[in-house]
Image: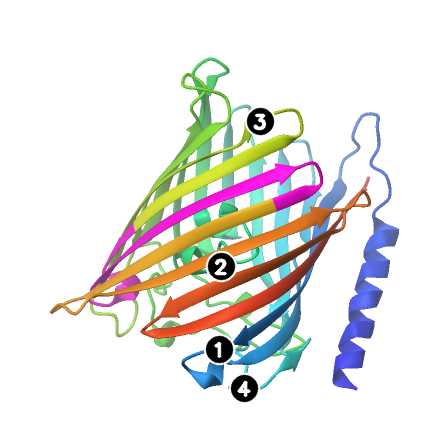
């Protein structure tokens, strides 16, 4: 009955979003206005043949991420990103079907857009690394999500320079701390609110952590080549013996091969000194290649994570995935994937299927 109620609520949300997605005005925009999109994912992961038998389960869940922009003027807006997803880990060997889903605000900040710059303040996701977002495939981003920065409070800005000949280049700087406000909790399923006493890097309630990144395209070398350079410093929280320092370097692109085929390679290296405030270093290497041919897609990616604690005894984790899918004319996509994970000396295998659909909306 609980699962049926969740599916009913999900259906109501989709219906309401469809009503809200009226066609945008083709003429001059009116302000204030609301616009955004609702990406919807329904995924099933079946984990089997695991060394740790507690990891073997079948998990079906939704991830819905409404992105809403309340634009007061052409330059000034309030941006918020909501997330509905499982907020608790599954119990060992306990299959789940749309359980433990919680709704929370991942971002909520004020944004000012100038001619070639932006300023923002509030709760946001600081920039650092790209493989957690653009590594191809159903499972391509999984290990890289270790160093994704989310749900921080602070402020920052960016400036974009360049032209078509030399490429455009965006320098972004952020200063922040981990969210400990009421927004760090969730509704539907309760996610415990973050407390300063919980510890963790940047969980300091002061602006002692920062990231600086440079993103752009290398038009002077060739079309379709992008890059990312990043550094992040996060002060240790309560109980953390060290501060974390991270460095990121990435190259990626998208190139046409023939009339109806594109290829998109991704290469990223990330180093973390005193990762997570602990006395250990971590290195991540992500390699990925996505191929699209008409409505079809295929992706293969591999992420290697080396963990080197103080005193020696380093270890290597690895995840390789292959996946493919089809994009229908109505915007629905369907993908299937397989991943093999080696984590902390344990191996497991996962088969998965993913349905995605995005609903845009706007209202003057």
Query: For the C terminus, which image quadrant?
Result: top right
Q: Residue furthest top?
A: 165
Span shown in magenta:
271-297
Rendered residue at 30%/68% (across/down):
237
Q: Is residue 324 left or right of residue 363?
A: left
Q: Earlier in the sequence, mark 1 or mark 4?
A: 1
Q: Is residue 264 above or below residue 270?
A: above
Residue 59 is situated, as x and y percent measured from the top left of the image, at 61, 75
Rendered residue at 64%/41% (across/down):
77
Q: Is residue 226 above or below residue 233?
A: above
Question: Is residue 274 inside the magenta stretch?
Answer: yes
Q: Is residue 170 visible?
A: no
Q: Secondary structure at mark 1?
A: loop
Neighbor class of circle 2 (other Cα within 10 Å; few <14, some 14-19, many 20+) is many
- Identify which residue, 79 or 306, lies in the foreground: 306
Q: Disc 1 or disc 4, which is closer to the eye?
A: 1
Residue on which disc 3 sits = 256
Residue 351 is situated, as x and y percent measured from the top left of the image, at 58, 67
């Amino acid at each position: 009955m609980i699962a049926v109620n969740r599916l009913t609520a999900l259906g109501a949300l989709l219906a309401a979003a469809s009503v809200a997605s009226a066609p945008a005005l083709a003429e001059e925009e009116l302000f204030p206005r609301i616009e955004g999109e609702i990406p919807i994912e329904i995924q099933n992961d079946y984990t089997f043949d695991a060394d740790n038998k507690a990891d073997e389960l079948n998990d079906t869940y939704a991830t819905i991420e409404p992105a809403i922009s309340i634009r007061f003027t052409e330059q000034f807006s309030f941006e918020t990103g909501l997330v509905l997803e499982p907020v608790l880990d599954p119990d060992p060997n306990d299959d789940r079907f749309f359980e433990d889903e919680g709704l929370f605000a991942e971002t909520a900040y004020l944004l000012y857009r100038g001619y070639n710059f932006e300023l923002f303040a509030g709760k946001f996701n600081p920039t650092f690394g790209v493989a957690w977002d653009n590594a191809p495939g159903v499972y391509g981003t999984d290990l890289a999500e270790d160093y994704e920065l989310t749900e921080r409070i602070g402020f920052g800005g960016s400036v974009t320079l360049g032209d078509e000949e030399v490429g455009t280049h965006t320098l972004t700087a952020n200063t922040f701390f981990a969210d400990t406000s009421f927004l760090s909790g969730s509704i539907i399923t309760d996610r415990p609110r973050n407390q300063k006493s919980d510890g963790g890097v940047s969980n300091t309630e002061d602006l002692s952590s920062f990231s600086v990144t440079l993103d752009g395209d290398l038009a002077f070398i060739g079309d379709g080549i992008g890059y990312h350079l990043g550094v992040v410093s996060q002060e240790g929280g309560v109980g953390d013996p060290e501060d974390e320092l991270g460095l990121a370097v990435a190259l990626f692109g998208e190139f046409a091969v023939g009339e109806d085929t594109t290829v998109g390679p991704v290469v990223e290296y990330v180093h973390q000194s005193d990762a997570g405030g602990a006395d250990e270093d971590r290195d991540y290497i992500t390699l990925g290649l996505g191929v699209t041919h008409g409505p079809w897609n295929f992706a293969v990616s591999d992420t290697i994570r080396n963990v080197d604690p103080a005193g020696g005894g380093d270890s290597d984790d690895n995840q390789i995935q292959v996946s493919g899918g089809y994009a229908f004319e109505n915007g629905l996509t369907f993908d299937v994937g397989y991943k093999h994970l080696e984590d902390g000396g344990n191996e497991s295998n996962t088969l998965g299927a993913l349905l995605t659909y995005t609903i845009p909306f706007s209202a003057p």
